[in-house]
């Protein structure tokens, strides 16, 4: 099968420090692929180059086989690639519906819409549908997001990316700050997103969590891809070995 | 895909199920300020026989117009996480410009008023460019404008008041009455009209939505593809337009442009906004709250004056009320 998103020979350096040394990455249609690696392995840098936030110094990115040069996160969004940022990129004083539509507000039809008047009812109605489809339960869609629990907030952030992503969603440590129940909510949501046909790229430090939710795992070490596993056929020990240099697959780089 | 419906009730394992629906809670904040207004109003009505009558209530409303107008613009700026210290002296500069346009240059009143309001917009535009493009912190950028505008008002007018004696129509804008038979000042109607416009802008349009969102989380707003710099410039320009309107209102009420005045109005405007429940850290606030805040300030000023309490003590009391209002708002948010 042809990869949906593929990166080859990605180089990113800051002065004399190489964050990525000809890194490779592939994501296939409709899968959850986890990107793991020790601190400083280049995971976040790689994700930022793939989601348009950083421009690589060298290398090639292909989306469905066609070369892609991203000029920024908005450009990535136009190609159906969305990112859930690590630090909950929501406006906490706005309600869930307003956050879902942030930057993509629906205007009223007619002259009022041209004056910038928003169709708040329509946005709220569609938001309720969206949250319902994704199985996200919120106590009150009209409440400021600040009042939601951490898990609910993260679900809103994920929903926001998912609604607009037609192809790939990057999630950088989406469960890092969450408790057990909330973590499960987010992992369930990730599976539902995958089942809806959107590829999920998950960055996580939590190996049991990676094995529970991912279909495949790609391992980065010192700025290069060193191993690829099918989640069902690997173990936490094997992943840790690959991350720390104990295992290196010849064909992975 | 499983599709459980969105429920209105809190789920097991989810903290803090809300007892009061969010929409009602938002109203609660305004009721709190409104309750405060009722309390001070009732107090002065009982304490002084000269307080509650048509003439005095009208003069309270008239006194609310200038601070209210400035506070409307300031509300947008503060909700977006900024601050505008330039509206007081900016208003004086706009008043001087009105005098220049209408009295010195002999322009027709409507044209002079239009140019004055646009000049206010220009002051706001410069603030917006400094804040959004040059990244000068709002406090500094508008402090600089406060000084510059105050100085310019004196320079342009040669430090002397400009009178509107040749254009009685100009004075009518503020204290004339278009309601036949009633002695009700136009400027109060004008304040009501621009407050409705401001309210619609803030709560119904994309401008208001982005003001809240920038004040709530600027980085997230930018990552959502919203042109934060452009919207900040628009918000400061809007505040400037209100400054221009206030300049017209104050000079038409006084029948003259007083170049040395204005300083201190910006703080009263900020006080009105804060008493009305708008958070100085951005992201929260309402136009109704701001109007109530402005009314509380003018009721206090008027009532204390009627009770012959010296100006110095009026300021002390106003200071206490501001702290009380903010404290009540914080307490409400903790318990809610």
Image (cartoon, coloured by chain):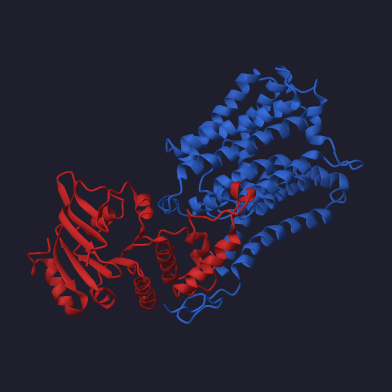
Q: Is residue A88 left or right of residue B197?
A: left
Please report the residue visible at 73 percent of the width from the left and 56 percent of the height from the top: B37
Task: Give the colour chain A carries in the figure.
Answer: red
Please report the residue visible at 57 percent of the width from the left and 31 percent of the height from the top: B122
**x and y percentages locating residue B285 in the rendered image:** 59, 54
- Please state which of residues B15 and A228 is positioned toward the viewer in this rendering: A228
Q: Is residue A106 left or right of residue B98?
A: left
Q: Residue farthest to the bottom?
A: B12
Please report the residue visible at 69 percent of the width from the left and 22 percent of the height from the top: B101
Q: Is residue A20 left or right of residue A177?
A: left
- Please state which of residues B19 and B225 is positioned toward the viewer in this rendering: B225
Task: Give the colour chain B carries in the figure.
Answer: blue
Can see residue A95? no
**Residue B333 position by quadrant:** bottom right
Quadrant holding the C terminus of chain B: bottom right
Does residue B215 sit above or below B188 in this rendering? below
**Residue A188 position by quadrant:** bottom left
- Please state which of residues A239 and A23 is positioned toward the viewer in this rendering: A23
């Amino acid at each position: 099968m042809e990869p949906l998103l593929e990166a080859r020979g990605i180089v990113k350096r800051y002065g004399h420090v190489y964050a990525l040394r000809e890194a490779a990455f592939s994501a296939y249609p409709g899968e959850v692929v986890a990107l793991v690696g020790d601190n400083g392995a280049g995971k976040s840098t790689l994700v930022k180059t793939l989601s348009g936030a950083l421009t690589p110094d060298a290398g090639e990115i292909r989306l469905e086989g066609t070369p892609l040069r991203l000029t920024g996160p908005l450009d990535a969004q136009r190609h159906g690639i969305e990112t859930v940022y690590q630090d909950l990129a929501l406006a906490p004083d706005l309600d869930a519906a307003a956050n879902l539509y942030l930057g993509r507000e629906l205007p009223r039809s007619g002259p009022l819409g041209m004056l910038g008047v928003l169709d708040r009812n329509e946005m709220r109605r569609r938001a309720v549908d969206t949250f319902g489809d994704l199985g996200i339960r919120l106590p009150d869609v009209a409440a400021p997001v600040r009042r939601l629990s951490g898990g609910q907030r993260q679900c809103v952030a994920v929903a926001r990316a998912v609604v607009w992503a037609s192809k790939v969603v990057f999630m950088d440590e989406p469960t890092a700050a969450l408790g057990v129940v909330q973590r499960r909510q987010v992992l369930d949501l990730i599976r539902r997103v995958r089942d809806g046909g959107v590829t999920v790229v998950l960055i996580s430090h939590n190996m049991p969590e990676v094995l529970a939710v991912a279909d495949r795992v790609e391992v980065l070490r010192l700025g290069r891809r060193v191993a690829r596993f099918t989640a069902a056929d690997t173990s936490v020990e094997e992943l840790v070995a690959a991350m720390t240099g104990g295992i290196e697959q010849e064909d992975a780089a | 895909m499983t599709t459980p419906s969105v429920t209105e009730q809190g789920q097991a394992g989810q903290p803090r199920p809300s007892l009061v629906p969010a929409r009602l809670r938002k109203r609660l904040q305004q009721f709190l300020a409104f309750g405060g207004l009722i309390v001070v109003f009732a107090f002065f009505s009982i304490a002084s026989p000269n307080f509650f009558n048509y003439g005095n209530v009208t003069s309270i409303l008239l006194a609310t117009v200038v601070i209210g107008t400035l506070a409307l613009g300031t509300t947008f700026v503060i909700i977006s996480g900024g601050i505008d210290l330039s509206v007081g002296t900016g208003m004086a500069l706009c008043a001087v410009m009105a005098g220049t346009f209408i009295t010195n240059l002999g322009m027709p009143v409507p044209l002079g008023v239009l140019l004055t309001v646009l000049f206010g917009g220009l002051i706001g535009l410069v603030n917006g460019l400094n804040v959004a493009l040059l990244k000068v912190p709002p406090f500094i950028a508008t402090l600089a404008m406060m000084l510059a505008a105050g100085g310019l008002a004196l320079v342009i007018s040669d430090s002397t008041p400009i009178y509107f004696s040749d254009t009685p129509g100009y004075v009518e804008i503020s204290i004339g009455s278009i309601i036949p038979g009633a002695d009700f000042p136009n400027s109060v109607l004008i304040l009501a009209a621009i407050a409705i416009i401001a309210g619609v802008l803030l709560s119904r349009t994309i401008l208001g939505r982005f003001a809240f969102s920038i004040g709530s989380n600027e980085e997230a707003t930018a990552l959502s593809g919203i042109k934060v710099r452009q919207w900040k410039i628009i918000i400061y320009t809007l505040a400037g337009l209100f400054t221009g309107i206030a300049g017209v209102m104050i000079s038409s009420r006084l029948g003259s442009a007083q170049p040395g005045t204005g300083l201190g109005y910006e703080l009263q405007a900020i006080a009105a906004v804060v008493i009305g429940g708008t958070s100085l850290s951005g992201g929260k606030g309402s136009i109704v709250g701001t109007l109530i805040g402005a009314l509380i300030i003018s009721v206090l000023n008027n009532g204390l004056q009627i009770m012959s309490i010296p100006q110095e003590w009026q300021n002390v009391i106003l200071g206490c009320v501001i702290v009380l209002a903010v404290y009540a708002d914080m307490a409400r948010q903790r318990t809610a």
